[in-house]
Image (cartoon, rainbow, N blue to C red):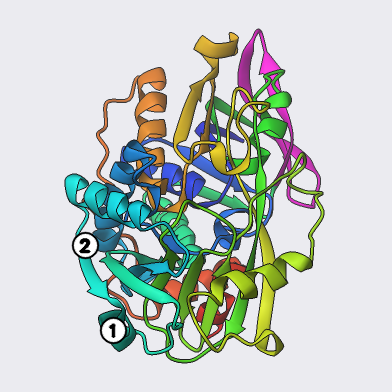
Amino acid sequence: METTVLVIGGGATGAGTARDLAMRGVDVTLVERDSFAGGTSGRSHGLLHSGARYVPGDREGAEECIAENRVVRRIAPHCISDTGGLFLQVAGDDPDFFEEKRAACKELGIEIEELSAEEAREAVPDLTEGVERALRVPDAVIHPTRLTVANAADAREHGATLLPGTEVTDLVVEDDAVRGALVDDGSGEREIRAEHVVNASGAWAGKLAAMAGVEMEMAPSSGVMVAVEYDGLGTVLNRARPAADGDIVIPHDGQVVLGTTSVDVEDPDDFSRDERDIDRMFDECGAMLSGLDPERIDRSYWGVRPLYSADRERHAGRQISRGFHLLDHAKRDGVSGFSSIVGGKLTTYRAMAEATSDRVCKRISVEGECRTAEESLLGHDQPGRIDELVAEFGADNPADADVIAR
């Protein structure tokens, strides 16, 4: 089989890249070893960031988030729940941090509204007595399986070839250039030839790059999420303190998702899962929201963040930037026909895909421009269509399993 561009990794970024390239008229093939969103995307907490989480410490990350937050709301309304969000100052939290966050949000144009404790409890009656004040921000809940499948299916509508359930067993390297990949869908190994290969395999990007003899400093970090039966929460809750364990609560209909931890791991396929982390989520998130009952856990799951660090000894876990990195291996490693997109967040998937597609199109001499920020995703005007596509691809992921089942 031959294709112009082979994208490896069917999470949100890989599917978004395939869509972007296909819309520019590129012959693209998307390969994913599991179902779409089967890796990090479908095991996330599903927060569409407003950017408020990343200030005051990471201005660039916050700017990326608020810009893409507005784009995703426009192109994928069928993949989000527009809940809004609250940042809560709880007794014992540093009030100066709250003030710095409010000032930084205002400076960046992130829409905010300060609420007193009484006003916050009027909005969310189940807030604990420890909540002292709140900042309303334009967070939302994103359903990653729907989002990823919508991108993949839209790519197919524009001519892309989709190969879920297909594992890359090796890369084809000839004369210091990646020329394709060997893949296996369970029926035997075959070769896909390509002019350019995009490594969008997330936390597994280092493993894939090694197949081309390229060394990449990945620093994957695992985090637990706990879905608990809970009625009545209609907004995202964030703790107004420096990022720490158990500081986000994500509402679903009849459930909330509590998260998360940050534990450095060596292998995204093989790492320990400490059940005590689940108890920690109840302890920490319970400082914001009352009535969380460990007896009502629906599911718990761990995801692995695709963090990239060129110096893991000095930067680990929450210290590593959540920004994205586009690596051109021709310039970086002397291996042509190969690019990697690593890091980033679900919120910024489309911007990551655009940057990747811009670079690839330059390499393969294609002049088409990005249209993904203007054109809505497949299914936006067809109620129920997106979940039909989810069922078609057999995409079943824990981040939004309850939403898809409904």
Q: Is residue 185 magenta?
A: yes
Q: Is residue 373 visible?
A: no
Image depth: mark 2 or mark 1 in front: 1
Kind of residue at disc 1:
Glu
Name the residue at 47% across, 30% down.
Answer: 325
Mark 2 or 1 closer to N-term? Answer: 2
Highlighted magenta segment, given as a residue range: 167-191
Q: Position of residue 328 (x, y in %)?
A: 49, 19
Q: Which mark is residue 118?
A: 1
x then y, percent, for residue 73: 27, 62
Label 2 belongs to which residue?
112
The single residue placed furthest to the front in the displayed view is 92
- Left or right side of 174 for 21: left
The kind of residue tagged 2 is Ile
How would you rate the neighbour count of disc 1 (Cα within 10 Å): few for under 14, some for 14-19, many for 20 or more? some
Check disc 2: other Cα within 10 Å, few if <14, some if 14-19, many if 20+. some
